Amino acid sequence: MSKVNSFLIPNVSTLPTDTQKAGQSNALKNGQASEFKGLMERELVRPQITPKDIGPELKVSTHATKRLQERNIELDGDEYVKLKEAIGKLRAKGGHDSLVITGKAAYVVDVDKNTVVTAVDRNSMNDNVFTKIDSTIFMV
């Protein structure tokens, strides 16, 4: 019986305190960099986007609004900036009715009017045919 007990419950003379546990788990090993420091460096090095780079305000048509809701596509800040950047690049290359493909969805945009015309979620992209477009840009 004692062999089983010593196997299941080891002989522990002292337990570390909460302060000792926190100090050990939060301490950096020799040569290891802080994750926070790395995150800050990446964010500070990222190029800043100016309003000139992204052009005028982006509009979303009534049809596109319905499609965004039906297909559960969230047009968050990152996606919005990608669309505006894409429209700026498309305008510079002479695009008018264009397809913008991001990591989340595909958008048909009217470059001249700065308007999202429709949207298709990533899972449904394979089943759709995009017509009447003159250019495509990948903003993944």
Image (tube, rainbow, N blue to C red):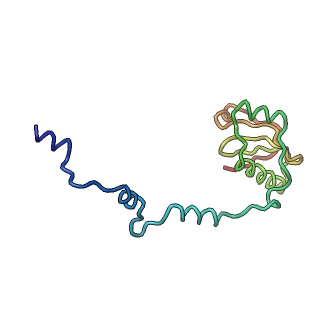
Where is 76 relative to 120, above or below? below
What residue appears at the point 72 percent right and 49 percent down from the top-left corner?
A: 77
Q: Quadrant of residue 109?
A: top right
Identify the residue at image location x=64%, y=66%.
44
**Residue in the image at 66% along x and 49% along y:** 140
| Figure label count | 0
Which of these two is toward me, 26 or 50?
Answer: 26
Which quadrant would residue 76 be assigned to in this image? top right
Left or right, residue 6 beside residue 33 = left
User: As drawn, is 23 to the left or to the right of 13?
Assistant: right
| Residue 54: percent from left, percent from top | 80, 56
Quadrant containing the N terminus is top left
Residue 61, position as x, y percentages in the image: 84, 38
Residue 19, image quadrant = bottom left
Tell which of 75 and 98 is nearer to you: 75
Q: Please give the name of the residue rendered at 74% of the width and 49% of the height, measured from the top-left corner.
A: 137
| Residue 12 rendering spot, x and y as whole percentages | 21, 51
Figure check: 6 above or below 37: above
Where residue 45 appears, as percent x and y from the top left, is: 64, 66
70 to 92, vertically: above or below: above
